[in-house]
Image (cartoon, rainbow, N blue to C red):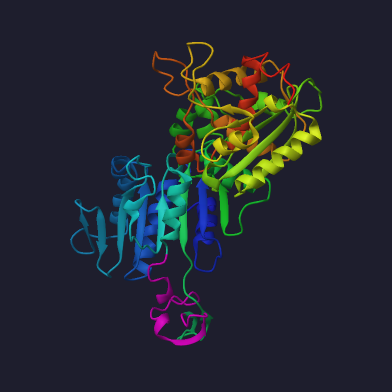
Amino acid sequence: MYHAKQLECLDYLSKDSDYQQILYGGSAGSGKSYLGCDWQLKRRLKYPNTRGLIGRAELKKLRLSTMATFWNLCGQMGLVAGKHYTYNGQDHVIKFFNGSEIILMDMADLPSDADFSRFGSLEISDYFCDEISEISAKAIHILHSRCRYKLTWFCRNCSTEGLSDCEVVDVNEQGKPLSWRCSKCGDVNSGLLPKGLMTCNPSKGWIYQDFYLASKNNSLRSDRMFIQALPTDNPHIPEAYLHTLQMLPEYDRKRLLEGNWEYDDDTDKLFSTENLSRMFRSEELFGTTYITADIARFGKDRTIIGVWNGLTLIKIKELRRSSLDETVNVLRQLQNEHKVILKNIISDEDGLGGGVVDFMKCTGFRNGSKPTEPIYQNLKAQCYFKLASLIEENKLTIHTNEYRDTIIRELEMIKRHKADSDGKLQVTPKEEIKNREGISPDFADMIMMRMYYELYTNYGKYVIG
């Protein structure tokens, strides 16, 4: 039997709901895998000849964990292997007697397949992804775009098959049918909506920003829903299991029992949430003026520019898809407005950043250049560790709250890279963060570059721009 939170989720997943992506969970023992497997099975049985997908970061974990629940459910429903369904262990496809099928797929980011070309011409009707904190935002975005398989075959009102063979009511400019009149119930609609169910435990990755925080701030996308479910919401969970969760270390207990998304005790993190929140205050740590700029690579990403007075960030300018000329013009306007000498303007030299440095003759920041101390892998790592030190010592302030959540989130994503090795201190590569979290830490890099002038304390101090 379902408990109340599962019923709420199934209501959002129903054909009558306009929600397309539902995130369910936020703790252990809330019936996540049971719900996802049960939903997939019933969708395949209700809608013949459709195709679902069950995914997880690693196929091995999917087969050993999630699918163990799936096979148990098959038995409970009276489905017999070889009669009602077959499973091909080579291509990992479950085929049902009514023509429906479920594909099992690993969803991990692979260096050899950064664009998920292995999804290829994949077409599905819906999907269930378990433990999506292990899956990148990019993987989910691409997967959801593949939800189009035979959705127009079924009436959204009465579920009758054959909708696309009924009377066409509306077409687009190219003459492609947009809606039909169901021959059984008479309702005019365009068929089923794409549906995706995702489950997780609390995580500070992309799902924190896109679902949990957005839901908390009432800014969740209109096609998405977040359902927080705790072990205590599940009346079927054994008391002994709850006791086991209560005995976990504080970090795991806060997440897995209490469903606390804000609690984070990752020892590899350079910045604590408490220290980052404390940056946003009106205290003035004024001095020399600076401008730091993280320039969009090849014009495709964001350009983030910060204006500093001493160690106080007083203004942030965000540019999207701006040309080289536009970026240089904005930098010159800010330079004149805040009276910043040329040597105190620093821009990264990756992509278009190199052009900015060439045009303005300002300081260039090379991430991989040599640090001033040999314990760091490169200058970028040294600057991030210096930034962490100043923030911990309460020596850096930010006067604008406009990008507060984004800045905190991005700096929380910066961690010590390969912390278990005995090599030089390094931080998480930008591309790895983009693949894992679904965003580029551009605000974080803009703030990090201010540390260049803390390492080279006399650089540009007596230069007139």
State whether residue 400 appears in this view.
Answer: no
- The percent position of residue 31, horizontal first and vertical second, equals 45, 46
Q: How many marks?
A: 0
- The percent position of residue 65, horizontal first and vertical second, equals 33, 41
Q: Image point 58% across, 28% down: which residue?
A: 364
Viewport quadrant of the C terminus: top right
Image position of 405 (left or right of 438): right
State whether residue 143 appears in this view.
Answer: yes
Most foreground residue, 315 or 203: 315
Q: Is residue 68 above or below residue 397?
A: below
- The percent position of residue 24, horizontal first and vertical second, equals 51, 48
Q: Image point 66% across, 41% down: which residue?
A: 328
Q: Is residue 209 above or below residue 266?
A: below
Q: Quadrant of residue 160?
A: bottom left
Most foreground residue, 452 or 120: 452
> Magenta region's main secondary structure?
loop
- In the image, which residues are magenta? 148-176
Q: Is residue 211 above or below residue 454?
A: below
Viewport quadrant of the N terminus: bottom left
Most foreground residue, 246 or 41: 41
Q: Quadrant of residue 419?
A: top left
Image position of 94 (left or right of 119): left
Asked whether 163 falls inside the magenta stretch, the response is: yes
Asked whether 326 falls inside the magenta stretch, the response is: no
Image position of 52 (left or right of 235): left
- The percent position of residue 362, horizontal first and vertical second, equals 64, 29
